[in-house]
Image (spheres, helix red, strand yellow):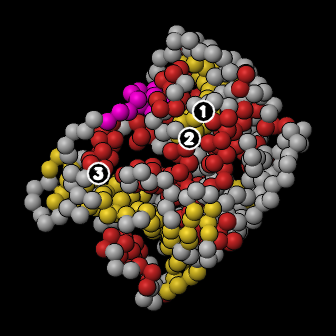
Amino acid sequence: MKQMTRRTFLTHTLAAAATVTIAGTKSSGRVLGANDVIRVGVAGIHGQGNGHIEEYVGLKGVQITYLIDPDTRLFASRSASIKEKWGRSPVCVQDIRKALEDKELDAISIATPNHWHSLMTIWACQAGKDVYVEKPLSHNISEGRRCVEAARRYNRIVQHGTQQRSSAGRANEIAAVHSGKYGKLLVSKGYCCKPRWSIGRKEKTQPPAELDFNIWLGPAPEQPYHANLVHYNWHWFWDFGNGDIGNQGIHEIDVARWAIKGATLPTKVWSLGGRFAYQDQGQTPNTQMAVLEYGDTLLVFEVRGLVDKPKDSPFKFKVANEYYTTDGMITEGKFYPKNGGTPEKLAHFDVKVTPGGAWGSFLHAVRSRKIADCNADVEVGHLSCVLVHAANTSYRLGEKVPFDAKSQKLGDNREIVETFHNLTNNLLGVGVKLEETSYQLGRTLTLDPKTERFVGEGADQANAFLTCSYREPFVVPAKV
């Protein structure tokens, strides 16, 4: 596992990083009237990017005019529904810089690998485009703050792809937690338990002729192509992804933070886990626990990838949030009293969510130019992504310890202890011999919420993960 190195950014001339401003400034953006069509370019058209296309095709007042992907193999098939809906095919390009040069383009919808999210967001803002960017907003902590700065400086709408922020039902659940009607919140718990079995090993080869692998790599370090990178398993490599806590998990970790009233960043974080049950090419943990401290409230997160979807499996798919209070537990729209009794449906609260779902509400905010209309504003996304990056930093700075050694790390918090038991029981259930196995026990790190830097013991090593070395000319600027 290669550790990210600290990079001291010097002042880059725009000539040296011409890609940053090639599309111009915010003056490039059109002023939209109420009846104007919003012209969108979708960047990254595999997987979730196809979902973006389907969403926009189903909405009014929008047109997809560009498809952007370094792999040309899906251009024809993805263009079909667009031509059917609007009577013209989109312009298809491999390099987003070409699309950003078009002053008639209003917005970019980003569904690329994680390591591209922030740079594309910043470039788009500088070019006068609004942005819908998939989760996670950033590949490291520093990138996220640069995205916030770019959105504010260039007066752009940037919506983060944590779609539960656009759910009135979820907003009501959060309002119930905040109300105190069901007790004081003690632990906000999130789960990401999806099947993440071995990806095997793929040999290093030449990339397909249809793929511009240089563009695909973008900001990431130069390295050979292999088929486990393109188009999904990059999630499990540190140079491109953030593991499942930053894939599916960011949705639920965002909700968990949302439930802690007024929460921004925690003051302490630690994480543990490992990649168990198989040996493959992947690097990120398939099993992970993270604990983040917000005063007297804890945010606990559980990742278990050694699960199955069948209903008769003892280790089931589970993507959910639970809120443990002094009086009981809230989950899935119900309150479960602490001392037993019949679960009750949550009361109705007055909540405000911009209608239209995630993509429809984004288009509404693009027209209104009001950050308040953006259900998941860029800064909301950034703060939640910091939790992912902080947990992964703790994990990556950890040490191997045997399962049979009693760890004082867990303490006596019931939800923390039970989460660890969930992990170990799952491992035992899929045949992992714990007595012969060690796990990665992460370092406890202290975070300063104001500076978004680690402080105290271990800070120098942890702060080395705040950013990374970028491959020219795909450089995320140190200052926007």
Q: Is residue 98 visible?
A: no
SS of the residue under disc 3: helix
Q: Is residue 355 shown in magenta?
A: yes
Q: Position of residue 341 (x, y in %)?
A: 9, 60
The residue at which mark 1 appears reads as 131
Q: Disc 3 versus disc 1: distance between alpha carbons?
A: 31 Å
Q: Position of residue 70 (x, y in %)?
A: 72, 38
Which labelled disc corresponds to residue 378?
2
Question: Do the CB atoms of the residues marked 1 and 2 lie less than 8 Å apart?
Answer: yes
Identify the amino acid type marked 2: Val
Q: Position of residue 290 (x, y in %)?
A: 47, 67
Residue at position x 58%, y 46% in the image: 137
**Horizontal relation, residue 238 to residue 25: left or right:** left
Quarter of the image with the C terminus in it: top right
Tag nearer the camera, 1 or 2? 2
- Relative to residue 236, is residue 130 depicted above or below? above
Dot 2 crowding, Cα within 10 Å, few <14, some 14–19, many 20+: many
Dot 1 crowding, Cα within 10 Å, few <14, some 14–19, many 20+: many
Q: Is residue 245 visible?
A: yes
Q: Earlier in the sequence, mark 2 or mark 3?
A: 3
Dot 3 crowding, Cα within 10 Å, few <14, some 14–19, many 20+: many
Residue at position x 73%, y 58% in the image: 468
